[in-house]
Amino acid sequence: MLLAGSALAQVELVDPDAPGARAPKKPSLDEVDPTATADEEEDDTPVITSGTARKIVDAGVKDLKEKLKDLKPLDTKPVVERPPPPPIETRIITDGDLDLAWQVWRAANEKSSSDIKGEQVARQRLVELKDEIGATNLETWAVGLLRAAEAHEEKGDSGGAVEIALTATQLAPDLPATWVGLARVYFFGDPSDFGRYLGALKNAIVAQVSDPRYARAALADLATTLLFALVLTAVVLLLVLAVRRGFYALYDFHFLFPRVASRWQTGALAVVLLSLPIVFRLGLVPVLLVLFFALALYLTLAERVVVAVLIGLLGLVPTLSSLVVDKLAFAGTRAEALFALERGGTGSEGFAAELTRLASEDKASYTELMALGRYDLRRGRIDAAIKSFRKALTIRPDDPPARINLGMAMVIGGDLENPRALFEEAGKAAPSLAQAPYNLGRLTQRRLAVMGDKVAGEVDRIASTLFQARTLDPSYKSLSKDADGTPRSMAANVYLQSVPLPLDEFIGEAKAPDAARRVKSQVQQLLTGDVNETLALVYPGLLALLVLGFGALATTVHAAKVCNKCGRPVSKRGDPDVSVGSLMCTQCVNVFARKNVAAPSLKVRKQLEVARYQSRIERTGSILGFLCSGMGHVFAGFPARGAFYGFLFIALLTGAVLRNGVLRPPFEPLPLLVRMSPVGVCLVLVYVLTLRGLRKKQGTG
């Protein structure tokens, strides 16, 4: 149309029917330019008829249409193709790759005095690698950093030591040794800042309770200490009673032989008889039973009951020792190897290869398959991880963790359809698992980035699922840099989150039957001798009950008693004049019960003898109470209370002696001061309180 208008503007249309249309108008003289030339004055312009004009217009319109075909709207923006979404980053990582990064840091650390920035960059790379492979704890790296931190501290670089120790806690936040090392660096850097190193020690204690390698070792040490204290309490208690009542047993034993035999001879023979179980290596329990039998007639009912109970419990010690090993073993078992594999550290490639072989032969357990799958997932072997999780689901078809982990592996592998059902079903079955909604939100993000408008209706699900995940686990907030859930990293183990194995799964694999049998056999041989296991379990208690009943025959067999005044034996065999049922010897009866029978000098001598006896008893009880809490009470005639105090004291003392424990943790334990402080406080309290109670008992007695 523009071209047509232009053409019309250049052509003067003439109506052929108008008057004078065929004769052009001549200009007047006033309209003629006098300076014009003759050529200019002569009008040679051709006359255009209406038909010619129509042809020109039609040609212009046609040309306009051709040009309009190639014309674009002035306000239309050019179409830009959407760039492809960034891929989920995965690469196969081996222990060799991790060792290389470690060697790089070591080299940088050696040059840290001249290149601090290089050491920091290399150390930060270790943390990035940990995040990239999704490892929860890189323990060997963390311990190595702690050693380097100590070296920096010795050189006077407290700031560098603290930075390196803090990085160690990032690499292994669940390892107690890292927090112990950080507390040490804090302390040497600034001893006055109590909050820093006490807070680190608090974290170390929490980590020790959570880590089965430390917690179970501590429980095993505690159980061992209590069992050892039980054995020692029984031995010490019987020895104290032998000191208190043994003289009366030897007194009556002498009357079993002819009068020509002297007391030292019969006493030596008694010692030989008592030592026969030791000579024939029958075990500790037979020795204690023989001693109990020798003293039974001269013990009170309370003393006999306490001794019988302790000896009966000794029969349970071998079985209890076996249970301690069986139920608390972790170090050296398959569970420890699975624990290290599942945490993602280095040094597990050999064990992973073994589990891969077992899985190919369908011999791997659920725990082994899950640990292997997570290990492969971290190291970039996605297809192998999918196979492991699928096999785990064949063992436990409705297991939510296996479904979530399988869905994660499938998303990384490029499947954006099937994992959605896995995440949704797992979320319904286990609403407390934050990984289900979190991975579902990430999957939806991925679908939107890849498929675009085809899945535009799923946009609202992203915010709701990620919000649900962060509500269940606030730590997921750190995995995103924007409020809309934009991922901080596209690394597979950061973009998506797998479900770790619960601690109970590892405990189920912590089995050491051979070690338990060996421990039971050794303890049984030591305590009950070489007898059948069932017999070893019951015969100490049965024989102790028989001896307990035998002690009730003291009156029937006229066993010697203790004179209440001077402590001499009261027995008709040695003193025929003593009356039946008398609580005093004949001398004391004549001096204190009968008038005008003994001379005044004899009364004075007897009173001095009684005073010396009472002083000796009190002094001996005090010495025994000083040497071992509770034994003074036993000597003074309070066996139950004394046995309880003695057990507490011996247990605490044993814990102090065995301060390093019977099971060593894999890395550095809590500082000795931290471990021994509660033991020392309890030991002092028990010791002081029992001595105070003994003094009160002796004063009232």
Image (cartoon, rainbow, N blue to C red):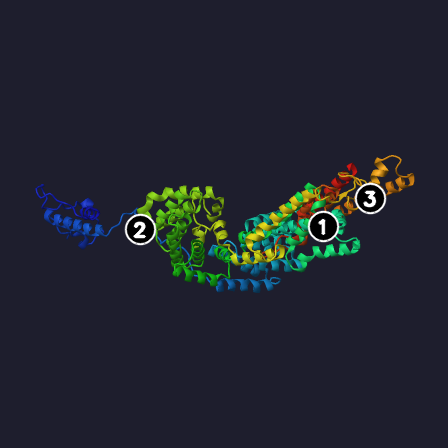
What whole-number distance in Å separates the C-alpha atoms at marks 3 and 1?
20 Å
Residue 424: image quadrant is top left
Residue marked by disc 2: 79
Picture coordinates of residue 76 (x, y %)?
Answer: 30, 47
Residue 412 location, quadrant: bottom left
Q: Nearer the viewer, residue 397 or 249?
A: 249
Instruction: Please name which of the two marks, 2 or 1, marks the residue nearer to the observer.
Output: 1
- x, y percent for residue 578: 79, 41
Q: Foreground residue, 475 or 206?
A: 206
Disc with the residue nearer the chain's start (2 vs 1): 2
| Residue that label 3 marks | 613
In the image, what residue type sits under mark 3? Tyr
* C-alpha separation, residue under disc 3 versus residue under disc 2: 115 Å
Left or right: 242 with respect to 87? Answer: right
| Label 3 or label 2, whichever comes before in sequence order | 2
108 displayed left or right of 31: right
Q: Nearer the viewer, residue 287 or 349?
A: 287
> Label 1 amino acid?
Leu
Q: Residue furthest top?
A: 595
**CA gap, disc 2 and disc 1:** 100 Å
Q: How many labels does the image show?
A: 3
Q: Which label was assigned to residue 586?
A: none
Amino acid under label 2? Answer: Val
Quarter of the rendering occupied by the C terminus: top right
Q: Which of marks 3 and 1 is nearer the N terminus?
A: 1
Q: Circle 1 sits in a helix, a strand or a loop, which is it?
A: helix
Q: Are marks 3 and 1 in contact (CB under 8 Å)?
A: no
- How packed mark 1 is, by other alpha carbons closer than 10 Å (few <14, some 14-19, many 20 or more), is some
* Tag 1 residue: 239
